[in-house]
Amino acid sequence: MRHNLHNNFDFQEILYRIEKLSSDSKPLWGKMNVEQMVAHLNAFLETALDINNPKRMFIGKVIGTFFKARYISEKQFSKNSKTHKNYKFSDVRDFQKEKIRSIDLLNQFYKGGISKWTTKPHPFFGHLTAEEWAIVQWKHYDHHLRQFGV
């Protein structure tokens, strides 16, 4: 079984790694600082929880389904990939607030179960099943936590 945020072990591991982040954590690659990275994770998890709903990108409608298989595969996300504008943050963020928000959202996602997850399409890849949302959320957290060495 692939890693996913619906699996208790994987969920607990992500929470443990989030706790290891500090306001002094530095990226091993990329341009985001730790506050922006956690805000980025939060915004994407809010999409899965149907809290925010960015419009589907035109290019995603055209080619998103061709790339979906790799997106939900066991392969790690590529470093320095382009970030959708709805998930980019350049303003100053409060690390502790973002970290607390992230833990809260993770708990909502895990404990709320699939009834809390969106049925709206991913902005690029289109429709994702509940299992696919759980996989990509785990992969997304894992990717950025590795980016910050945790």
Image (cartoon, helix red, strand yellow):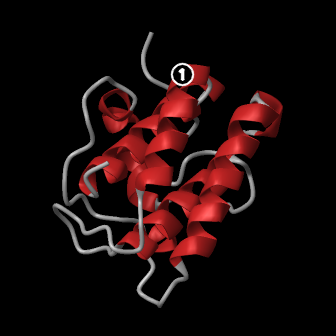
**In this picture, residue 123 sits left or right of residue 115:** left
Question: Which residue is denoted by mark 1 in the rendering?
Answer: 9
Taking the view exactly as shown, the residue that stands out farthest to the top is: 1
Quarter holding residue 12: top right
Asked if residue 12 lies left or right of residue 149, the reply is: right
Q: Position of residue 104 (x, y in %)?
A: 71, 53
Q: Residue at x 40, y 37 (%)?
A: 139
Q: Position of residue 42 (x, y in %)?
A: 57, 60
Percent position (x, y) of residue 96?
57, 72
Question: Residue, x 74% and y 52% (percent of image)?
Answer: 50
Which residue occupies the extreme bottom position in the image? Answer: 91
| Marker count (numbered) | 1
Whether residue 78 can be seen here: yes
Q: Is residue 119 above or below residue 129?
A: below
> Which quadrant of the structure image shows residue 112?
top right
What secondary structure is marked by label 1? helix
Res 74 quadrant in image? top left
Q: Is residue 40 above or below residue 123?
A: below
Q: In x, y percent, where is residue 101?
A: 66, 63
**Camera sees residue 125:** no
The image shows residue 144, relative to residue 7, as above or below, that is below
61 vs 89, nearest the viewer: 89
Q: Amino acid at mark 1?
A: Phe
Give neighbour class at mark 1: few <14, some 14-19, many 20+ (Cα, 10 Å). Answer: few
Residue sitting at x 32%, y 46%? 143
The one of 39 and 94 positioned closer to us in this rendering: 94
Foreground pick, 5 / 73: 5
| Quarter in which the N terminus is drawn | top left
Is residue 111 toward the left or the right of residue 2 in the image?
Answer: right
89 or 19: nearer the eye? 19
